Image (spheres, rainbow, N blue to C red):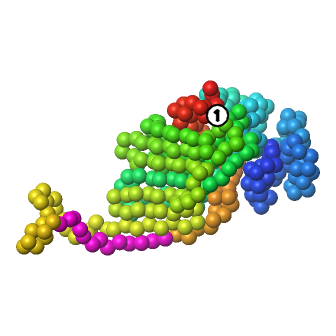
Amino acid sequence: MKQVRLAILGQGRSGRDIHGLHLKSDTERFKVVAVVEPFNARRERAAVEYGCDIYNDYRELFNRNDIDLVVNATPSYLHYSITKDLLQHKFNVLCEKPFTPTVAELDDLVATAKENNCKLMVFQQSRFAGYFEKVKEIIASDNLGRIVQVNIQFNGYARRWDWQCCLEYNGGNLANTGPHPLDQALNIMDMYDGMPNIYCKMDSCNSFGDAEDYVKLILTAPNKPLIDLEISSCDAYPSFTYKVQGTKGTLKGNMSKIEWKYFKPEEAPFQKLIKTTLTSGTEMLPAYCGEKLNWYEESWNGDPNSPFIFAVRKYYNMVYDHLVENKPLIITLDQVRQQIAVINEAHRQNPQFDIRK
């Protein structure tokens, strides 16, 4: 089995605790040969944890020709410039989300990758999260019928005072947390050949910076379910991650437990439209439509660590297949482009939080 040789840029929350954590357990397929990290203590720890070379500046990698893939887990506002530099030096790149602040920058990186015959990927591991795959499976089963509305909430109550709450660093809930649920939402809509109608309301509630920490995003399109996506840092009573309303039933759940109930139309009492006034009994009392449906209820208990372990492994399965066997990406750059276009429009509707201004 070919072993893919990697360099990781950054040993922070993503570089070490997500990518590094997985790569230390997937050593048959991957080998971390270099880590770039500005903090000395993190560099020294990386040398011990991975048994790799360590550098202070990513440009020191340009002297090497034994690296198959560079994982760009630097701060968000550096993703575009560093990824472009790496591509221009003929490195394949896996970039953390948020990929780029604008569609124009994404298009530039895609063109740069093509010009230099490099592979380019964006880390959207939540597409492979167990809870999301289960939601997709239930929707596809048709037990819920035609899907009318999908509510997605990535909510909680939190104050934030780090760099990710600053617009100058491409901060805010939509850029930081948003790529996960938004990628899922657009995958459910499944209209990558066009753009949905978009309404967005943003607010700043508990942020110490100037970026938004409340997002309400509504997506609609002909013959598609309405998507109601919420990313709120002022919700002390978060209720669910997913709620799916269909013509035959409903699903609700979070990342570790999902419940759904539905009826079978062929078992339902026969009814027909009555346009005259509904009455009850010989006294002609007022009446309402009422019937008893036979509900089927099911549930799923997943691993609460799935979004951070199972999903990452499945993402790296895709990475390996793409690099070694040249299989097409499941999460494509065109799909990421649509996501960024939605984010750009959301910011346009909320100019006080638009980093392009």
Name the residue type under label 1.
Pro
Instruction: Indicate whether 257 appears above or below 42.
Output: below
* Secondary structure found at label 1: loop
Instruction: State the residue lying farthest toward the left.
Output: 282
Asked whether, in this view, residue 132 is left or right of residue 207, the answer is left
Q: In the displayed structure, would residue 230 be above or below residue 251?
A: above
> Is residue 326 visible to the viewer in this orientation of the structure?
no
Q: What's the magenta bit mostly, secondary-structure-wise?
A: loop
Q: Which picture quadrant has residue 81?
A: top right
Mark 1, residues whose alpha carbon is within 10 Å: few (<14), some, or many (≥20)? many
Residue 188: x percent and y percent? 48, 50
Coordinates of residue 112 in the picture (x, y in percent): 69, 29
Which residue corresponds to the image point at 77% horizontal and 57% vertical from the top-left? 21
Q: Relative to residue 259, is residue 242 depicted above or below?
A: above
Magenta stretch: includes residue 294: yes
Where is the N terminus found, in terms of image quarters?
A: bottom right
Give the camera-side residue of 297 and 283.
Answer: 283
The verdict on residue 230 being magenta is no
The location of residue 243, given as percent across then percent down, is 47, 58
Residue at image coords 64%, 41%: 172
The image quadrant that residue 356 belongs to is top right
Residue 230 seen by the camera: yes
To which residue does mark 1 refer? 101
Q: Nearer the viewer, residue 260 or 234?
A: 234
The one of 140 and 11 positioned closer to us in this rendering: 11
